[in-house]
Image (cartoon, rainbow, N blue to C red):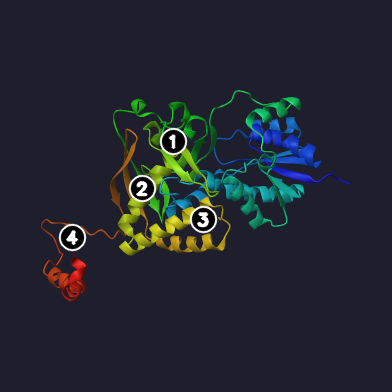
């Protein structure tokens, strides 16, 4: 009887390297691996490591452009920031990883998909639910969740089976893609302690940022960023450039006590320079082009959208329904935003929109004011009528 094939999402780290041998040994299976580049990944070296460990096939895919255009930018248009702080970098990447895994599993004839998520985090939920939505027939295996080992036990297992690993241990657990970098564990588990500088890799500390501010302009078309200082840039290049530019000025650090889906409060530290800049710029342009009611409805949608992404429900009709509403709100979100970066802060210092709702003649207090001040008296009388009526008939409410 032929061995079954299991497709493993392979990052090249200790957890997934040990998973290759564990799946072969415990489940009597052959293991193919898939490595997905959503930013900052050396595909070739990771593929070689997988084959060296014993994978029968090591696949890879460059998903950076798809990630930014089909996952990041829709979330940007939605204004999705989980608990108003986390731009959902890892959470946005997981459904795309699951999609690529399902496609590759079909290609290699795998009967199951495996991943290296723990039983304590959010990613297990995102991966399992996403695979279930796309391929209900495929079994999902989570070796790290099943074995419950600590890092020392994993290292011992790797040594016993001659699995090549780097024993030099980073004291933090990190995950990164183009939209952000997450850092947790180690010293960061004490919420009273300030994150040490060695936790950060993309952003300068304030004392190492330039003394002079940097100004630049980003233009959007229907909610999508297209140009930087007038230069049209591809989606990946734009995000990468902003990560560097804002990171130099120390912009993008987030220190957050986060409510995980599994019910745990966790101290999470993030670096997301491009995400912070683009969310602020996009919101500034929306303030010019959306009505008050649209802005407020979008704020409610943004919270729901963030929860849906965070909770692993990307591949649902609910998310697609929200996308339809959001897309319509972006019809006139076209224009330019001027940004200032200085000492860890991103400031919006200017905005323009050809179809903007800001009208100088109505807003100005100088000559040229076209607002009818006399109309205010009647407006206030009608607007305040229910207040006066209740005050007259129910005096006790004023106590």
Q: CA distance from mark 2 to mark 3?
A: 23 Å
Across and down, in percent, residue 376 comes to 14, 68
Q: CA distance from mark 4 to mark 3?
A: 42 Å
Residue beneath disc 2: 281
Say whether residue 82 is left or right of residue 38. left
Q: Residue at x 42, y 48 (%)?
A: 226
Task: Report whether residue 384 is seen.
Answer: no
| Earlier residue among tags 1 and 4 | 1
Residue beneath disc 1: 191
| Earlier residue among tags 1 and 2 | 1
**SS label for mark 4:** helix
Q: Quadrant of the C terminus?
A: bottom left
**SS label for mark 2:** helix
Nearer the observer: mark 2 or 3; the answer is 3
Residue 361, label in figure:
4
Nearer the observer: mark 4 or 3; the answer is 3
Q: Residue at x 41, y 45 (%)?
A: 85
- Image quadrant in which you'd find residue 5: top right
Across and down, in percent, residue 108 comes to 75, 47
Nearer the observer, 153 or 324: 153
Residue 308, label in figure:
3
């Amino acid at each position: 009887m032929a061995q079954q094939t299991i497709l493993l999402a392979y990052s090249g780290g200790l957890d997934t390297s040990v998973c290759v041998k564990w799946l072969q040994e415990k489940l009597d299976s052959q293991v193919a691996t898939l490595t997905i580049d959503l930013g900052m990944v050396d595909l070739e070296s990771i593929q070689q490591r997988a084959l060296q460990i014993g994978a029968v096939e090591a696949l890879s895919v460059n998903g950076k452009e798809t990630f930014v255009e089909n996952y990041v930018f829709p979330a940007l248009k939605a204004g999705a920031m989980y608990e108003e702080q986390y731009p959902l970098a890892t959470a946005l990447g997981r459904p795309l990883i699951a999609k690529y895994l399902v496609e590759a599993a079909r290609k290699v004839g795998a009967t199951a998909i495996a991943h290296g998520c723990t039983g304590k985090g959010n990613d297990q939920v995102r991966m399992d639910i996403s695979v279930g939505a796309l391929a209900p027939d495929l079994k999902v295996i989570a070796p790290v969740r099943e074995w419950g080992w600590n890092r020392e036990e994993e290292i011992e297992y790797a040594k016993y089976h001659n699995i090549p690993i780097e024993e030099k241990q980073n004291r933090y657990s990190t995950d990164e893609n183009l939209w952000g970098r997450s850092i947790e564990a180690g010293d960061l588990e004490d919420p009273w302690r300030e994150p040490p500088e060695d936790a950060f890799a993309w952003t300068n500390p304030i004392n190492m940022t330039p003394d002079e501010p940097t100004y630049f302009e980003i233009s959007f078309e229907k909610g999508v960023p297209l140009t930087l200082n007038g230069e049209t840039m591809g989606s990946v290049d734009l995000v990468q450039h902003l990560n560097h530019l804002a990171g130099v000025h120390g912009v993008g650090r987030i220190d957050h006590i986060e409510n995980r889906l599994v019910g745990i409060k966790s101290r999470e530290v993030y670096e997301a320079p491009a995400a912070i800049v683009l969310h602020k710029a996009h919101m500034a342009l929306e303030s010019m082009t959306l009505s008050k009611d649209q802005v407020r409805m979008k704020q409610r949608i943004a919270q729901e959208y963030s929860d849906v992404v965070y909770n692993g429900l990307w591949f649902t009709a609910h998310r697609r329904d929200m996308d339809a509403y959001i897309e319509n709100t972006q019809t006139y979100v076209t224009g330019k935003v001027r940004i200032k970066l200085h000492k860890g802060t991103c400031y919006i210092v200017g905005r323009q929109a050809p179809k903007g709702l800001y009208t100088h003649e109505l807003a100005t207090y100088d000559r040229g004011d076209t607002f009818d001040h006399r109309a205010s008296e009647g407006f206030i009388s009608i607007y305040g009528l229910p207040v006066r009526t209740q005050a007259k008939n129910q005096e006790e409410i004023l106590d």
